[in-house]
Amino acid sequence: MKGLIIVGSAKVGSHTAALAKYLKGQFEDHEFDVEIFDLADRPIHQLDVSGASEPSETYKANMKDLQTKAREADFFVLGSPNYHGSYSGILKNALDHLTMDDFKMKPVGLVGNSGGIVSAEPLSHLRLIVRTLLGIAVPTQIATHDSDYNKLDDGTYYLANEEFQLRARLFVDQIVSFAKNSPYEHLK
Ligand SMILES: Cc1cc2nc3c(=O)[nH]c(=O)nc-3n(C[C@H](O)[C@H](O)[C@H](O)COP(=O)(O)O)c2cc1C
């Protein structure tokens, strides 16, 4: 089983990326192979269906890699910071480069982080998008706040809040269960 965690923060070394890293460790405890695609580290170009712009080779390579990994994934986690009460445009742009063929009947977990008042609204908005892509957004989701993280000596964030660590384990268990027992294989 392969999973893909897409991180949609504009910041390299974001809280959302730290959460993704924690989740990856939990998936690995289930012997699931999970990759993190952090759009801050590996940016892709803005969707341009008319081909008016010429993206750089790096952007094109990142894009191709994202599309390959998405097609191969058995499940997803979508992670986003709260930007103006919703998920980031960076993540939406990435999703606009993908299709129903990538998501159809695959479990999708939703996670996010807010710097102001904690909000699950970005995740509710993402839930609608996942439905449109024919993915199955699992019920458990994770909405953290900056204060749920601490920094290592090198400045890297890590998820420090123990309640969220527990929730992360439940979240991962749920996705693992959906991925292993998909009743929808014949609909893919
Ligand atoms: C464009 C933009 C819009 C934002 N809007 C909100 C908001 O509506 N509510 C909020 O709580 N925080 C908002 N923030 C703050 C981010 O949620 C905060 O910086 C958070 O730490 C981002 O998480 P990250 O480190 O995973 O990127 C906004 C930040 C940016 C850059």
Image: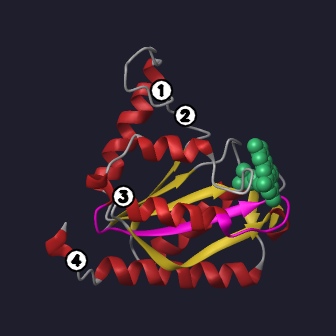
Task: Quadrant for the N terminus, please.
Answer: bottom left
Magenta residues span 104-121
Percent x, y of residue 51: 38, 18
**Mark 3 vs 4: CB contact within 8 A:** no
Kind of residue at disc 3: Leu
Task: Quadrant for the C terminus, please.
Answer: bottom left
Question: Considering the numbered disc 1 on the image, is that residue within a helix, a strand or a loop?
Answer: helix
Question: Considering the numbered disc 3 on the image, is that residue within a helix, a strand or a loop?
Answer: loop
Q: Earlier in the sequence, mark 2 or mark 4?
A: 2
Question: Is disc 3's CB within 8 Å of ligand 1?
Answer: no
**Which-is-in-front pick, marks 3 and 4?**
3
**Mark 2 vs 1: CB contact within 8 A:** yes
Q: CA distance from mark 1 to mark 4?
A: 34 Å
Reading the image, the residue beneath label 1 is: 59
Dot 1 crowding, Cα within 10 Å, few <14, some 14–19, many 20+: some
Reading the image, the residue beneath label 3 is: 133
Vertical relation: 135 (above or below) 43: below
Q: Would you identify the image quadrant in which residue 104 lies?
A: bottom left
Reading the image, the residue beneath label 2 is: 43
Q: CA distance from mark 1 to mark 3?
A: 24 Å
Question: Is disc 1's CB within 8 Å of ligand 1?
Answer: no
Percent x, y of residue 19: 65, 64
Q: Earlier in the sequence, mark 3 or mark 2?
A: 2
